[in-house]
Amino acid sequence: QVQVVESGGGLVQAGGSLRLSCATSGSNIHTMGWYRQAPGKQRDRVATITDSSTNYADSVKGRFTISRDNAKSTVYLQMNSLKPEDTAVYYCYAVNFLGSYWGQGTQVTVSS
C-alpha cells in the first residue's frame, strides 16, 4: 500500500506564490501528479510528471512547475502568479504497477 501525504496549502493573495509538497511511500512509482477540485466542480488534472516528461493543464502553463525528488519519493508543485480561480483542494496522486493512490488533499485559497 502506498501512502500519499500533501502539505503546503494555505491562503495567499492574487499574484502570490505557494509550493505544495507530496511525500509518498512505496516503490516503483513511475508517475506522480496533481489534480484539483473547486467547490461544485469536477476534479481536474493540473500537472503530471514521469521520469521523462512533464505535462500541464492549459490553465496553469507558464505559472505552475511540477518537479520530483526520486531520492525522497516526493513531488512538488510550485505555483506562481496565483489567481482566485486557482482556489481549490489540491490532490496528489502516485501510480505504480499495482495501481493509483491518492492523498487527502490540501486547500489552496487565493484571495482577490
Image (cartoon, helix red, strand yellow):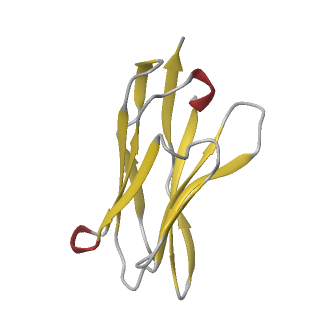
Q: Residue furthest front?
A: 62
26 up-or-down from 17: above or below: below
Image quadrant of residue 51? bottom left
Percent of width and height locating residue 65: 41, 50
Residue shown at 43%/73% (left/top)? Answer: 2
Q: Going by the picture, which residue comes out furthest to the top?
A: 112
Q: How many marks?
A: 0
| Percent x, y of residue 18 | 36, 34
> In this image, 30 relative to 88: left or right?
left
Nearer to the camera, 96 or 25:
96
What residue sits 77% from the left and 37% below the top?
Answer: 41
Q: In which image quadrant can residue 37 be found?
A: top right
Image height check: is 18 above or below 90? above
Q: Residue at x 47, y 40 (%)?
A: 63
- Whether residue 90 is situated above or below residue 9 in the rendered picture: below
- Residue 74 placement, left or right of 102: left
Is residue 84 or residue 54 the one in the foreground? 54
**Residue 87 place in picture, x, y as percent:** 58, 28
Above or below, 24 relative to 27? above
**The C terminus, quarter of image:** top right
Residue 17 screen position, x and y as percent: 37, 30
